Image (cartoon, helix red, strand yellow):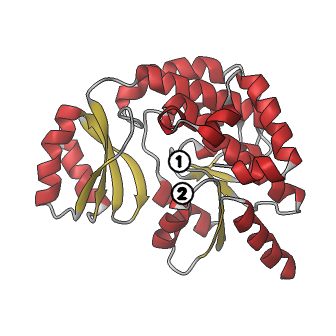
Amino acid sequence: MARDLLEGDPGSAEFLRQAEARLAMPLGRLIVDGPEAELQATENAQPAILFHSLALLRQLTANGIEPGALAGHSMGEFAGLVAGAALDPLDALAAVRARGAAMSAAAPPASGMIAVLGLPDGTVEQVCAASGARVVVANYNAPGQVVISGSEAGLNAVSPQLQAAGAKRLVRLPVSGAFHSPLMAGAARVFAAAWEKIPLRPLRRPQVFNADAQVHQDPVEVRRLMVGQLTGPVRWTQSIQRLQQLGVDTFIEVGPRRTLTGLVKKIVPGAVVHNIEDVPSMTAYLKAAHAR
């Protein structure tokens, strides 16, 4: 992750030095050498992924590429706040470091998340509603792709019901807890205390937020939404549909992997979608953009 950026871009290497000093963690070693289990730990993965995204964003901005509107998936909303000039990059990393640590510490045992493939959102909602709040919808990722979150007992109870309702697949996610569910209330309280101390400005660009798939620019509202995000669902399908309503027809995913690119294609068939995850994809995009 991000090895080519760190080796080929002095600006990214300097950003890493500043990030490691701010976070007091060996971010570069984790990103380049792992070990994988340590990198994937929630408290490490979140700042590592955000650093990668922000290093790419920095290069895009330096090459004159500016977003017209923004959305981020879960933790990616912090990158959106940087792109919207509401949050400084190092402050964003500090916020995400605090968020990841709070989520890791508060993750209850015997809980987790399952991706449900092939069912309408409403069907999944009905099954979860009948679970007595033991399981909730955590991510509306795309039509026919919803993630549920809850206790182990709850997940075990609803899985046969989802299969009976026609789910094509149930995929257990490799996460350490029931994220985006009420079981994260303790993490939300801890994160809120740290988040309140980090400077946040009004957004200069419209950003659609996961909590309600609406545009918000006021810092007070944004702080509340970012805390509520820990216990509430990621409304990604609705957020992308809202961007489309705002006139967005070209989507650029900035960050490691191509997960969101695939989701956007399912949500808005026919949309122009680009993915920038490393130096080659960045170079290809900039070449095409400057040729237009």
Residue on which the image places disc 1: 210
Q: Nearer the viewer, residue 39 or 68?
A: 39
Element under label 2?
helix
Q: Quadrant of the C terminus?
A: bottom right
The answer to which quarter of the image holds residue 203 is top right
Going by the numbered disc 1, the residue's amino acid type is Asn
Residue on which the image places disc 2: 239
**Image coordinates for residue 138, horizontal then vertical, percent:** 38, 44
**Image coordinates for residue 249, horizontal then vertical, percent:** 64, 74
**Image coordinates for residue 247, horizontal then vertical, percent:** 66, 71
**Image coordinates for residue 184, horizontal then vertical, percent:** 41, 27
Going by the image, does 65 lie left or right of 268? right
Q: Residue at x 25, y 54 (%)?
A: 124
The answer to which quarter of the image holds residue 87 is top right
Element under label 1?
loop
Going by the image, does 156 lie left or right of 119? left
